[in-house]
């Protein structure tokens, strides 16, 4: 909201500069976003009068009809070329002689146009930086003092404070409200506007009536009738004030309502009295199917929860939000019915949102207007209308206020301030602060009692008063101390944090980088990844974009995006991981958590295993790299070894390649998977080379028994190594063979390590050679060759038989 | 005294050969020839029985002396030859130490995780535990319990992603404060890290971002303690010379409320680009827990007081690492992440 410094000074007597005032406001909780001169770069422009049109210079290439004007200022005349249609003898206007500057640093010089010298420039609003009008030069009053500096004459030597008011302080949404703050903060006297209404003979009550049918939504409605008016442009001082705070002048009557809104914070509405049926206002909820064409020309469907201002026949305005087109003030209006009311904040907010109508009036009503101050605003505006429109205010106001709201009394204890803040201002200071903020204070008793003014709806309990006192006293006076704990409690970290940290540490130490991707993903890409049905997905009602509209059901989509982004930045090799929540609809086990969230780890790898270096050959990552990363993560997570079960057709995530993916199982429970990303998915993400992915549910791992470390005595007797190289049919997996060997439960076999895998010409197609190193050892003796040979031979025979394996080289 | 000429001859020849040996293997040959099982000196010692008894002790002594002398010379020569051979071997295979080492490239901890961990550590040392909670929340936990009235413009302060009429993506981690307080009795000292969501996107706002909030509730805890705690935090995070400034503000869940600014560590407070010439950096919202919030979780505001604060992790990371575009955090360009390798 824009506050004019000059306007502010009407209500607070202070010699503080705008910058000083801004500083005090900021330190009292009113943000000042900027401080700027009303017009920048304007100098040397004066009030001049066109004495005569000396010559017609024809039409320019741009189509402007230009003329040479004789412009007078006291003691001197200038010949000035002007293309404005409103340039006419006798017009007083803004004259920029050579040497003047205009906003934007434009310097005015004598210039030759079509062979004729123009000694300066006559200026439009736009050229002066004070408005948008560029169709003609600025028309000043006939009595504007010739030669006077335009800046002073128009009151442009002003500073504008752009302030930001938090939603709890509707009282500060006005010049008067800010003036009250400044008074409290600086100790300067606050001057509430002097309001007197010179009323005519006719009783308002005989001219109009108001009836409130829904007092829950409109607890008070006041109105006045002003007659004999002429609609015309506002006088310059008023138009200029409105422009200074960013409002566009319209006509004298509408401008008055805006002026008083800005000055006192009370939204007003002027109806053309003659358009109101029976001159009777009925305040009620909309009827089913009722419609209204609002001031902006839109025909709006109303709902029965919306409060309408009506006449006996129809709705004429949306209460507190916007007036109707049929009853607005027009050039023909002579009598105004002026409304000043209080509307229920929640109701105004719901209505304004439902209609998508965010008006200055709704902005204030939804924050809470001043139910007692609305009469002063009504009187002020009525008198101004009469003054500016040449009319008369009817006698008395119509004021329907069925159950006046009591002003709350709130107790304030010094001990409470001390306890909450750790310090307390002196009693006189507390009383002074509250009084200047408009509270009636009784400090005769043990505890101070404050009566809350009607414009401070935010003050309802003691701690609210504590804040008021301390923010004016100064937050810089709050001491800086450390808490004295009443009792020491052990610091605890949730298991999710611990497991995340352990896994992050292991994977980053292994050279993988941690990514954080958006939790919302693209439904199109999810579809390409196999989520065909929207069930099971959670969709945002109001996403930033469709690409970020579904909560991720897995980490895979985000990680694929990481690969895609890096590929587009010429980084083809990616080894990355992410730890984060996945989202699914609520399940019974989730209790009062509205969605099913699980903590997952996702790992992604693509491109070369290592950067191109002198000491290593280049190899692409493969499925064993991702498996290794998954195993490292499982180990870091403290999980017991899990089983790897290759997916059969139709099993496992659909974004993994058939036959190149496996489940990670703990018992019967699937805790994750790894594999190669399916070609179709890669194509959806525009990734040309193979990508490998592993995902692990850390939530599932946390639910499993943890691996505990138990010391095994070191062997005291020597071990014997034997190699076992088998040629097996290609469909036999290494895991099956190992499981079979382990299944023999040979007590002397201590370790089994696969050290070679070979496929090729030497053994022929359809077969594979697998070689293990077997370690035999006994805890209590040195093994003899013979013992070892016996056991080893048993393995050769058993495995050879079961897998149709031949001992290689035997 | 002249010694036995045979011993002397063996000794002289052997000493000459030891001195002349050019390799450890040549030296070994000399040793075998003279001192080996059938070496010259060994043979002489074996033939001692054929020597007259009177000469035996003298000859035996001479042979032994010669043997000791030769062993010492061999050992000394062996050390010298080994050193020489090692020197030659090194010379023959000189590594190019300017070649890059076989790298063990570290991965990067995401800068947000780094800063979040640092915050957790700093408050951990002050006795703050950590609690986490769901990112999809109900209106009750995200707003109502935190003293945001229905249909109140305060709700516009946090532009919300809605999932249904009653569920939303949490706009702050404050719902975890409510869940934590409902689950335990005071004293409470917790911080709440986590992802949060607001419908806002530009170079300094991300629709998803991270917060760490803090909460302390106790029988006797004041806004002064809040200021002191935040000052301690700021000094640990940004350096020992920074200070904290409180400015009044408004949050529905605190009363009184304060914005906490840290004096600019870029310029020391005199004004620079980092602080946009103001000398201060806005990093935290804070205040005394609103009595309505305490009542909502079943605490008695006459019995206990509390304070809470919240900060954006991205904001802290951007200031700390001088990052000027928040979107970099979620692009995960490895050239960006790589700058945060351990």
Image (cartoon, rainbow, N blue to C red):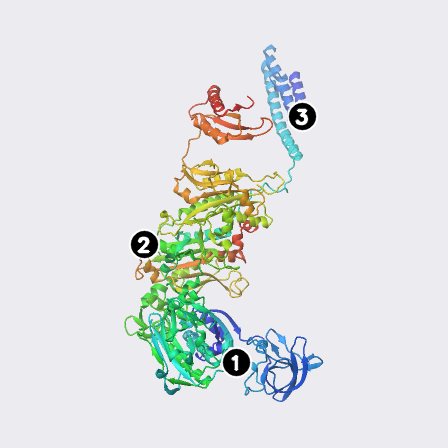
Whether residue A409 is visible, yes or no, is yes
Which label sits on residue B21?
3
Residue underneath mark 2: B185
Q: Nearer the viewer, mark 3 or mark 1?
A: 1
Question: How far from the left and from the top, in percent, is residue A637?
Answer: 44, 42
Q: Left or right: A428 with respect to A655?
A: left
Mark 3 — on which chain does it sit?
Answer: B
Mark 2 burial class by Cα count in 10 Å: few <14, some 14-19, many 20+ = few
Question: How far from the left and from the top, in percent, is residue B253?
Answer: 38, 61
Residue underneath mark 1: A155
Kind of element beneath mark 2 = loop
Q: Nearer the viewer, mark 2 or mark 3?
A: 2
Instruction: Examine the rendered structure and indicate whether residue B275 appears above or below residue A518.
Output: below
Kind of element beneath mark 1 = loop
Kind of element beneath mark 3 = loop
Looking at this view, is B21 or A627 the one in front? Answer: A627
Image quarter where the C terminus of chain A lies is top right
Mark 2 — on which chain does it sit?
Answer: B
């Amino acid at each position: 909201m824009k506050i004019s410094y000059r306007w502010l000074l009407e209500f607070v007597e202070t010699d503080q500069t705008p910058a000083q005032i801004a500083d005090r406001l900021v330190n009292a909780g009113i943000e000042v976003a900027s401080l700027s001169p009303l017009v920048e770069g304007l100098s040397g422009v004066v009030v001049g009068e066109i004495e005569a049109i000396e010559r017609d210079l024809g039409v320019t290439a741009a189509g402007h009809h230009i003329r040479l004007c004789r412009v007078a200022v006291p003691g001197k005349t200038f010949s000035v070329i002007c293309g404005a249609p409103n340039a006419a003898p006798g017009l007083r206007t803004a004259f920029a002689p050579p040497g003047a500057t205009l906003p934007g640093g434009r310097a005015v010089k004598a210039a030759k146009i079509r062979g004729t010298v123009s000694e300066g420039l006559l200026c439009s609003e736009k050229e002066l930086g004070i408005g948008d009008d560029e169709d003609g030069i600025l028309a000043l009053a006939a009595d504007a003092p010739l030669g006077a500096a335009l800046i002073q004459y128009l009151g442009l030597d002003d500073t504008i404070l752009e302030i930001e008011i938090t939603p709890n302080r509707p009282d500060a949404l006005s010049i008067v409200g800010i003036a009250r703050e400044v008074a409290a903060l600086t100790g300067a006297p606050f001057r509430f506007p002097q309001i007197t209404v010179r009323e005519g003979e006719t009783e308002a009550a005989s001219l109009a009536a108001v009836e409130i049918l829904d007092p829950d939504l409109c607890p008070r409605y006041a109105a006045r009738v002003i007659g004999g008016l002429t609609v015309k442009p506002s006088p310059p001082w008023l138009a200029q004030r409105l422009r200074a705070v960013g409002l566009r002048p319209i006509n004298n009557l509408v401008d008055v309502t805006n002026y008083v809104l800005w000055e006192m914070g009370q939204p007003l509405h002027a109806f053309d009295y003659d358009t109101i049926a029976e001159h009777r206002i009925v305040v009620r909820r909309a009827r089913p199917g009722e419609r209204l064409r609002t001031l902006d020309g839109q025909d709006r469907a109303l709902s029965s929860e919306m409060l309408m201002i009506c006449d006996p026949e129809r709705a004429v305005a949306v209460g507190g939000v916007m007036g109707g087109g049929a009853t607005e003030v027009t050039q023909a209006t002579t009598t105004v019915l002026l409304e000043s009311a209080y509307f229920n904040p929640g109701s105004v907010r719901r209505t304004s949102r439902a209609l998508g109508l965010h008006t200055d009036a709704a902005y204030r009503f939804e924050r809470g207007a001043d139910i007692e101050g609305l009469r002063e605003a009504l009187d002020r505006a009525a008198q101004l209308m009469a003054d500016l429109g040449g009319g008369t205010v009817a006698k008395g106001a119509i004021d329907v206020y069925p159950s006046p709201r009591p002003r709350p009394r709130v107790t304030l204890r010094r001990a409470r301030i001390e306890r909450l803040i750790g310090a307390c201002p002196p009693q006189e200071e507390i009383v002074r602060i509250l009084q200047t903020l408009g509270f009636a204070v009784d400090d005769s008793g043990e505890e101070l009692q404050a009566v809350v003014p009607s414009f401070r709806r935010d003050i309802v309990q003691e701690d609210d008063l504590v804040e008021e006192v301390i923010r004016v006293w100064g937050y810089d006076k709050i001491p800086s101390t450390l808490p004295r704990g009443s009792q020491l409690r052990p610091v605890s970290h949730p298991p999710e944090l611990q497991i995340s940290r352990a896994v992050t540490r292991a994977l980053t130490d292994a050279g993988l980088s941690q990514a954080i991707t958006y939790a919302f993903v693209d439904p199109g890409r999810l579809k390409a990844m196999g989520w065909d049905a929207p069930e099971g997905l959670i969709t945002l009602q109001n996403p930033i974009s469709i690409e970020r509209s579904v909560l991720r059901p897995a980490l895979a989509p985000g990680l694929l995006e990481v690969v895609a982004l890096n590929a587009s930045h010429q980084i083809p090799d990616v080894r990355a991981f992410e730890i984060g929540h996945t989202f699914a609809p609520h399940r019974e086990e989730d209790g009062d958590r509205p969605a099913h969230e699980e903590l997952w780890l996702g790992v992604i790898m693509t491109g070369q295993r290592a950067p191109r270096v002198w000491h290593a050959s280049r190899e692409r990552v493969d499925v064993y790299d991702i498996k290794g990363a998954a195993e490292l993560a499982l180990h870091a997570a403290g999980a017991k070894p899990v089983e790897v079960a290759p997916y059969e057709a139709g099993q496992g995530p659909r974004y993994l390649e058939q036959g190149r993916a496996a489940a990670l199982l703990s018992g019967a429970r699937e805790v994750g998977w790894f594999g190669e990303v399916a070609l179709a998915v890669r194509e959806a993400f525009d990734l040309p080379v193979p990508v490998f992915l592993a995902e692990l549910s850390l939530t599932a791992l946390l639910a499993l028994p943890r691996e505990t470390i138990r010391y095994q005595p070191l062997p005291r007797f020597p071990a014997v190594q034997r190699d076992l190289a088998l040629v097996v049919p290609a469909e036999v997996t290494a895991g099956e063979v190992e499981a079979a060997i382990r299944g023999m439960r040979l007590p002397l076999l201590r370790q089994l390590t696969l050290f070679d895998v070979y496929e090729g010409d030497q053994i022929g197609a359809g077969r594979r050679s697998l070689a293990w190193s077997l370690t035999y050892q006994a805890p209590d003796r040195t093994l003899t060759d013979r013992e070892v040979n016996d056991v080893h031979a048993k393995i050769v025979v058993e495995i050879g038989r079961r897998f149709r394996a031949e001992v290689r080289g035997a | 005294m002249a010694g036995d000429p045979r011993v002397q001859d063996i000794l002289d020849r052997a000493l000459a050969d030891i001195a002349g040996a050019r390799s450890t293997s040549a030296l070994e040959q000399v040793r075998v020839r003279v001192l080996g099982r059938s070496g010259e000196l060994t043979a002489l010692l074996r033939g001692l029985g054929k020597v007259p008894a009177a000469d035996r002790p003298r000859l035996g002594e001479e042979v032994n002396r010669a043997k000791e002398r030769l062993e010492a010379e061999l050992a000394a020569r062996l050390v010298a030859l080994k050193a020489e051979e090692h020197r030659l071997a090194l010379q023959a295979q000189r590594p190019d130490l300017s070649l890059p080492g076989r790298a063990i490239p570290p991965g990067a901890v995401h800068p947000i995780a780094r800063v979040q961990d640092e915050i957790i550590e700093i408050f951990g040392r002050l006795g703050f535990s950590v609690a986490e909670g769901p990112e999809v929340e109900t209106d009750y936990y995200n707003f109502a319990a935190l003293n945001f009235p229905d249909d109140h413009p305060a709700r516009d302060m946090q532009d919300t992603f809605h999932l249904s009429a009653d569920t939303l993506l949490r706009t702050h981690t404050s719902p975890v404060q409510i869940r934590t307080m409902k689950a335990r009795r005071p004293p409470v000292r917790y911080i709440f890290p986590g992802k949060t969501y607001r419908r806002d996107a530009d170079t300094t706002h991300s629709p998803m971002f991270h917060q760490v909030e803090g909460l302390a509730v106790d029988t006797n805890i004041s806004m002064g303690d809040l200021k002191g705690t935040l000052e301690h935090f700021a000094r640990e995070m940004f350096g020992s010379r920074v200070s904290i400034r409180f400015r009044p503000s408004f949050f529905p869940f605190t009363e009184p409320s304060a914005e906490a600014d840290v004096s600019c560590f870029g310029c020391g407070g005199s004004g620079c680009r980092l602080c946009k010439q103001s000398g201060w950096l806005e990093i935290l919202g804070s205040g005394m827990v609103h009595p309505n919030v305490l009542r909502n979780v079943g605490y008695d505001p006459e019995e206990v007081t509390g304070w809470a604060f919240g900060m954006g992790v991205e904001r802290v990371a951007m200031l700390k690492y001088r990052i000027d575009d928040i979107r970099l955090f979620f692009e995960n360009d490895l050239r960006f992440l790589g700058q945060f390798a351990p």
